[in-house]
Image (cartoon, rainbow, N blue to C red):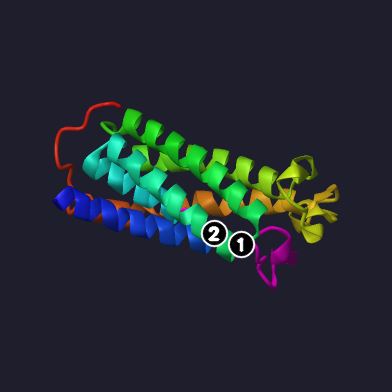
Amino acid sequence: MQMTRFTLAYVLLMTLVVVASNFLVQFPLNGELFGIQLGDILTWGAFTYPVAFLITDLTNRQFGPKAARRVVFAGFVVGVGLSFFTAVPRIAIASGSAYLAGQLLDISVFNRLRRQAWWRAPLVGSLIGSALDTLMFFSFAFAAFFVFLGPNEPFALEQAPILGILSAEAPRWISWAIGDFSVKMIVGLVMLLPYGALMNVLKPMQPIRAA
């Protein structure tokens, strides 16, 4: 009963993060920092999505990889389904594919490293999972090659200086992907704080075996 209650809470949190991120990724940041146009390198979704890895890692720590996969799949079905009402279909498809691959990779890496230093499993798992997620999402969502998933966003395909500062130019979504992953790395480090704070509260319910 306790496991069901906790996993339901994780599913609800995961759903909220996925839906919010799918909506916010459609909006570039406004303003300028150190001469860089933030809209050229970041969307608001970069700040919310890394929380999904924290939820997955806490589930994995407390209940093990099988439960974590159930939460990921439940978040995928509910979150992506709702995302079709808050984002264009191509964004929802890209998000769902990238989310599933990135989260499952995070679970695998976390489980391999869980008996090492407390910070290593959540940090390495989230960074590797984020790298795969970023590559898949921005390619599926904006690259011209994947136009069969839905119409392209013209603004994303506009040629612009990479990261807004380099002389070389590329479609704007390339800079978004680089900026997104950079933020995910920073947020991944920050997420170690709540993870560490909750370690003594959300203790493993039973000995965890590889799965």
Which residue is denoted by mark 2 in the rendering? 83
**Residue 104, position in %: x, y?**
43, 36
Query: Which quadrant of the structure image shows residue 41?
Result: bottom right
Q: CA gap, disc 1 to disc 2?
A: 6 Å
| Drawn side of residue 65 relative to residue 39, left or right | left
**Residue 203 sits inside the magenta stretch:** no
1 or 127, nearer to the observer = 1
- Badge 1 crowding class, 10 Å Cα cut-off, few under 14, some 14 to 19, many 20 or more, is many
Out of 150 and 140, give the one closest to the viewer: 150
Q: Is residue 7 above or below residue 209?
A: below
The residue positioned 26% from the left and 31% from the top of the image is: 115
Q: Label 1: which residue? A: 87
Residue at position x 28%, y 58% in the image:
9
Residue 176 on image: x %, y %: 68, 54
Which residues are drawn in magenta? Answer: 22-50
Asked if 32 appears above or below 5 in the picture, the reply is: below
Is residue 150 or residue 165 the one in the foreground? 150
Question: Which class describes the residues within 10 Å of circle 2: few (<14), some (14-19), or many (20+)?
Answer: many
Q: Amino acid at mark 2?
A: Ser
Left or right: 50 as drawn, with respect to 176:
left
Residue at 49% across, 41% down: 100
Contact (CB < 8 A) between labels 1 and 2? yes
For the C terminus, give its image quadrant.
top left
Q: Is residue 99 left or right of residue 164?
A: left
Label drawn at residue 34? none
Q: Residue at x 68, y 72 (%)?
A: 30
The residue type indicated by label 1 comes to Ala
Count of marks placed on residues: 2
Dot 2 lies on which element? Answer: helix
| Residue 51 x %, y % | 43, 55
Q: Would residue 117 be seen by someone viewing this image from the given angle?
A: no
